[in-house]
């Protein structure tokens, strides 16, 4: 499993996770151009991203979300509360209905060959989550903005 921070901090957050032929972004908090550049630095084509998982709706986690999803037709996964926050800002533009996926904390789902379990985290946002990933014999978890 590959787990790599693309960007971290108040200027924007994004993490790349890959296992076998499944590629996921956790948050997309920088411009689409920046995310593409960082993926290219890793030798990863942006058009091979299978999904974007959103931890919460703050701009440093979603500012490139709409552009990236539209350009590469990538599904987005977020909790109901996070979707309400995202869609109320209107800052990410239109997202195709088929790319809007609502998830529930502790209900696992899969993208490709990666099992994902979202879990509640404490943060001043609408239903924020962290994620646990299970792939092969490897387990990785990420949680942001909790300290």
Image (spheres, grey):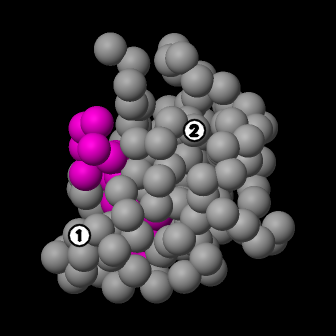
Q: Is residue 121 left or right of residue 2?
A: right
| Residue 49, x across and y down, in percent | 48, 74
- Residue 136 in the image: x percent, y percent? 43, 58
Across and down, in percent, residue 123 comes to 50, 17
**Based on the displayed image, in which of its 4 quarters is residue 78 positioned?**
top right
* Residue 51 in which image quadrant: bottom right
Q: Residue at x 76, y 72 (%)?
A: 96
> Where residue 57 is drawn, which disc sits there?
2
The dot on residue 74 is none
Q: Which residues are magenta?
A: 7-26
Q: Is residue 22 visible?
A: no
Q: Viewed as shown, does residue 6 lie left or right of 102?
A: left
In the foreground, 36 or 113: 36
Q: Which residue is mark 1?
A: 38
> Is 127 displayed left or right of 39 in the figure?
right
Q: Is residue 12 magenta?
A: yes
Callout 1 crowding tier (Cα within 10 Å): few <14, some 14–19, many ≥20: some
Residue 84: x and y, percent?
76, 38
Element at label 2:
loop
């Amino acid at each position: 499993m590959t787990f790599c921070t693309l960007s971290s901090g108040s200027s924007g957050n994004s993490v790349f996770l890959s296992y076998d032929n499944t590629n996921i972004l956790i948050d997309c908090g920088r411009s689409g151009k920046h995310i593409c550049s960082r993926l290219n630095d890793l030798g990863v084509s942006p058009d091979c991203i299978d999904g974007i998982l959103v931890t919460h709706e703050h701009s440093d986690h979603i500012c490139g979300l709409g552009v990236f999803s539209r350009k590469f037709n990538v599904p987005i996964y977020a909790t109901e509360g996070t979707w309400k926050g995202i869609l109320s800002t209107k800052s990410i533009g239109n997202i195709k209905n088929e790319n809007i996926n609502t998830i529930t904390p502790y209900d696992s789902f899969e993208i490709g060959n990666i099992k994902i379990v979202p879990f509640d985290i404490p943060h001043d946002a609408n239903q924020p989550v962290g994620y646990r990933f299970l792939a092969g014999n490897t387990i990785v978890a990420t949680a942001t903005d909790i300290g």
